[in-house]
Image (tube, rainbow, N blue to C red):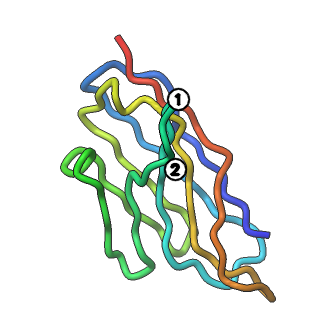
Amino acid sequence: QVQLVESGGGLVQPGGSLRLSCAASGPIFSINTMGWYRQAPGKQRELVASITSGGTTNYPNSVKGRFTISRDNAKNTVYVQMNSLKPEDTAVYYCHSIATAVGGLQRAYWGQGTQVTVSS
């Protein structure tokens, strides 16, 4: 099984910045897309940012220009730099990956989530 472990969440004031990291480990054969989703209380989980193995990125309008996703393929790690944070960015952030484990089929994997709270 591929495992995703997130780090970097926490409490930040409005206008501040945070950087989340997510490392994939286990019997990895290949990783296609990596990305981040978030879920606020009472709301559906939504895409924050994604990046393909070739470096193509995708952002919703709500974070475009404020968040930047990147990945280190050698380390099987994805990052999201979050700037100009707003209270509405408060949510649990989940790492997501489309990956193939050795001997397995391509499927989606999720991290355990990390809390991001934007508040003064």
Residue under the point 52% across and 42% down: 93
Residue ID for mark 1: 41
From this view, report whether residue 15 is shown above or below residue 39.
above
Q: Residue at x 70, y 78 (%)?
A: 28
2 or 1: tag closer to the N-terminus: 2
Classed neighbour count for the residue bearing mark 2: other residues with Cα under 10 Å, few (<14), some (14–19), many (≥20) = many
The x, y position of residue 24, in whole percent, is 64, 64
Q: Residues within 10 Å of mark 1 (few under 14, many from 20)?
A: few
Residue 100 falls left or right of residue 120: right
Whether 43 is drawn above or below 78: the answer is above
Q: Could you say where residue 101 lies in the image, as x and y percent from the top left?
A: 73, 80
User: Does dot 2 land on a helix, a strand or a loop?
Assistant: strand
The vertical placement of 23 against 117, above or below, is below
Identify which residue, 31 or 44, lies in the foreground.
44
How far from the left and from the top, in percent, is residue 15? 24, 25
Q: Residue furthest left?
A: 65
Quadrant position of the C terminus in the picture: top left
Residue at 49% in and 73% down: 33
Amino acid at dot 1: Pro
> Measuring 45% from the left and 79% from the top, which residue is drawn there?
53
- Three-letter code for the amino acid on which mark 2 is drawn: Ser
Q: Dot 1 lies on which element?
A: loop
Residue where numbered disc 2 is placed: 21
The front one of 40 and 35 is 40
Q: Quadrant of residue 52?
A: bottom left
Relative side of 14 to 7, left or right:
left
**Which residue lies most toward the top here?**
120
Quick check: 9 left or right of 83? right
